Amino acid sequence: LKVNFRLALFGGVTNHPLIENLNDNSSYPQLAAELELFGDTDNPMHSGLLQIRNTFGSGGDYKSLEFSLGYRFRFIRKNNFNIYAQTRFATLNSFSVDIIDTNPANNSVDIRRNETEFDIPFIFGIGADIKVSDNGYISLLYDRFFALGLENSDNFPADFMVGYKFNL
C-alpha cells in the first residue's frame, strides 16, 4: 500500500471558542500548516492529518501553539471539489495568557500564565477542497465548532481558515 501526502498552509481568524472564561468574543489571527496522509488514490474518502496551528492575541490576550492528530471523512467527493467532516482527536497545546487578579484592596496584579496541556478533545469541523490545478486545491475550513470533553467560552464558535493544499 502506497501512502500519499498533501501539504496545506492556512490563514484565518478564531475567537478561541473552546477556551473557557475569556473576557470577550474578539477574533484573532491564526496560521496553520497541515500534512494529510491517505492511500493510493487521487480523491480519498478517508485520510489522517497532522496539524500545527499558531493563534495570536494582542498584548496579554490568549495565544497558543497547537499540534494535533486528526481524521477526515469526505462525504461528498467530486472530480473538482469535495466536502468533508473532520475530527482532531489528540492535541498538545502550549499557551500563554495574562490574567489580572484584583484583590480586596483594589490593587491589581498582572499574572502571566504559561502552560502546556495534552488533551483528547475530539474537536469537530467541516471543510471543502476546490481543485484549481492537477496538484493544487483551495481549502476552506470551519473548525472548532464543537468538542467533546472541553468547556467552551459560551460564544458562538468562529474559527475559519482559508488555505492552499498541494500534493507532495
Image: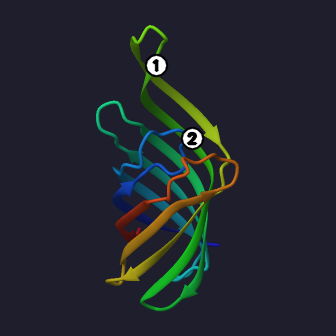
Position of 146 relative to 26 (above/below):
below
Q: Which residue is mark 1?
A: 101
**Picture quarter with the N terminus:** bottom right
Q: Residue furthest top?
A: 105
* Sequence-earlier tag: 2 or 1: 2
Q: Position of residue 98 (x, y in %)?
A: 40, 26
Badge 1 density bin: few <14, some 14–19, many ≥20, Cα 10 Å: few
Is 121 on the left-hand or right-hand side of 27?
right
Answer above or below: position of 85 versus 94: below
Name the amino acid, label 2. Answer: Leu
- Tag 1 secondary structure: strand
Image-based side of 9 in relation to 144, left or right? left
What residue is at 59 percent from the left and 34 percent from the top?
A: 117
Say which residue appears at 52% left-offset and 28% top-offset: 115
Which residue in the rendered view is the most extreme toward the bottom?
A: 79
**Residue appearing at x 29%, y 38% in the figure:** 58
Q: Quick one: SS at disc 2?
A: strand
Distance between the alpha carbons at the discs numbered 2 and 1:
27 Å
> Which quadrant of the view contains residue 123?
bottom right
Look at label 1 and name its amino acid.
Asp
Residue 96 place in picture, x, y as percent? 44, 30
